[in-house]
Image: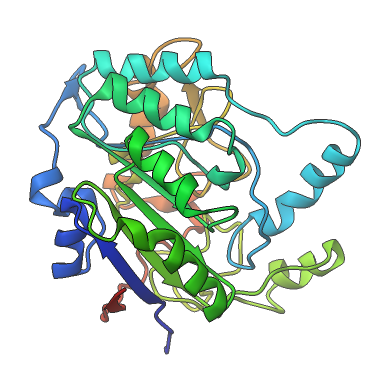
Amino acid sequence: MEYYEPRILYGGKGRYGQYWKQIGDSKIENIPSLVPPEVYLNGIKMFNSVQIQTYEFCNLKCDFCPNHYIIWDRLEDKKKGIPYNTMSIENYTKIVKNLANLGFQGRFSPYLMNEPLLDKDRIVEFIRIAKKHLGPKVFIQMDTNGTGLTSKFLGEMIDAGLNRIQIDDYFNDEYAHRMIEACRPFNDHKDFYFLISSNYNVEQVKKKDDVSKYRTGEKAHYGPPTYWNRGGLVNVNPDIPVPQKDCDLPSSQLYIKWDGEALLCCCDWEYKVVHGNVLETSIEEVWTNESYEHYRKTLREGRRDLLQMCRKCNKGGCESNKRGVLQDV
C-alpha cells in the first residue's frame, strides 16, 4: 500500500520541539524531559495527557474526520438560534483544580474534537487558568486549523502559558505561508514550539447530500498510515485491518467533553462510550471506575472485538515506516 506523508514545518526553541526535531516523535511518553512521574489512583496508573472540550464546534468538514457529517445538525441548530455547547469557565476551573490536587503533570490541551480558536474570547483565559493552577511542569499544547490566527493572538496565548501549537493546513501553500508569518515572531522563543503540517490530500465535504458518498465507501480517504477510521465512524484507510491488540488511549489519556463527561477517546465523536462525569463526581472516581477498567483490561487482552467503538477501529493496524519531511522555517 502507498501513502502520502504531510509536509511539516517547525520553529521555536521549546524543549518539546527540539526533541521532536531530533527523532520525529510527538508522544510525550517518548520524550524523557517531559515524562511525568508515575502517579497511581487506587492502584491504577494515572493518565499523562488531558484534553478538555471548551467549545463543541469545528468549522471544517474534512473527509477523514467525523465532523464532516456531524456539523450539519449543529449548523441547523445555529440557524434556529440554538448556540453551540460550551463549558463554563467555572466548570473548567473546577476540573483544573481537581487535576492540580491530584498532582497531575504532563500534556494539557484545552481542546477536544473542536476548533479551539473559534472560542477566541475565552481561550487565552483557559490557557492562563491551566498554567496558574497546574504550574510549569504541565505542557500546554493545542492543535488547530489556524482559523483567525494572527501573531497578536498567538502572542497572547504564549504569554498566558501556551507551550506548543500544531497548525493543520488542509488548504494550500498560500495558507501555509500565512501561518508561517503568524508564527515567525516566536521562532526564537525559548518556551514555545510550533508545527505547521500541510496535508493537501484532504477534501472538504461541501454539501450534506454528499455525506453518504464518504461514509459508504464510494469516496474513501487514503492518508498516512497513522490516520485511522476513528472507531469505524469514517472511511479512512479501509485496507488497514482492525488489529486485535492493545490501545493505550484509555490508559494514558483523559478526554473530557463540554459537560464533564469522560469519553472513551478522541475518536468518539458520537459520544457512544461515556465512562462517567467528572463534574458530578471527581476525576479520580471516574478514572478508576469499572467502566474504564473493563476497557483497559479487554484491550490488554487484545480483544477489541468485544468492545463498542474499538471493534471497528483500525488504529495501530499499520505503522508508518517513514518520517515526515521536516523543514525549518
In terms of image quadrants, where is residue 282? Answer: top left
Give residue 148's position: percent from left, percent from top.
59, 53
| Residue 245 visible from this viewpoint | no
Placement of 72 over or under 89, stated as above or below: below
| Residue under the point 55% across and 72% down | 175
Name the one closer to the observer, 299 or 192.
Answer: 192
Give residue 167's position: percent from left, percent from top.
45, 60
| Residue 215 visible from this viewpoint | yes
| Residue under the point 45% across and 74% down | 240
In terms of image quadrants, where is residue 30? Answer: bottom left
Placement of 173 over or under 42, stated as above or below: below
Give residue 138's position: percent from left, percent from top.
24, 33
Name the one closer to the observer, 22 or 207.
Answer: 22
Q: Quadrant of the C terminus?
A: bottom left
Count of numbered badges drawn on the protein: 0
| Residue under the point 38% across and 52% down | 165
Give the side of residue 218 with respect to residue 190, left or right. Answer: right
Give residue 81's position: percent from left, percent from top.
87, 32
| Residue under the point 51% across and 54% down | 150
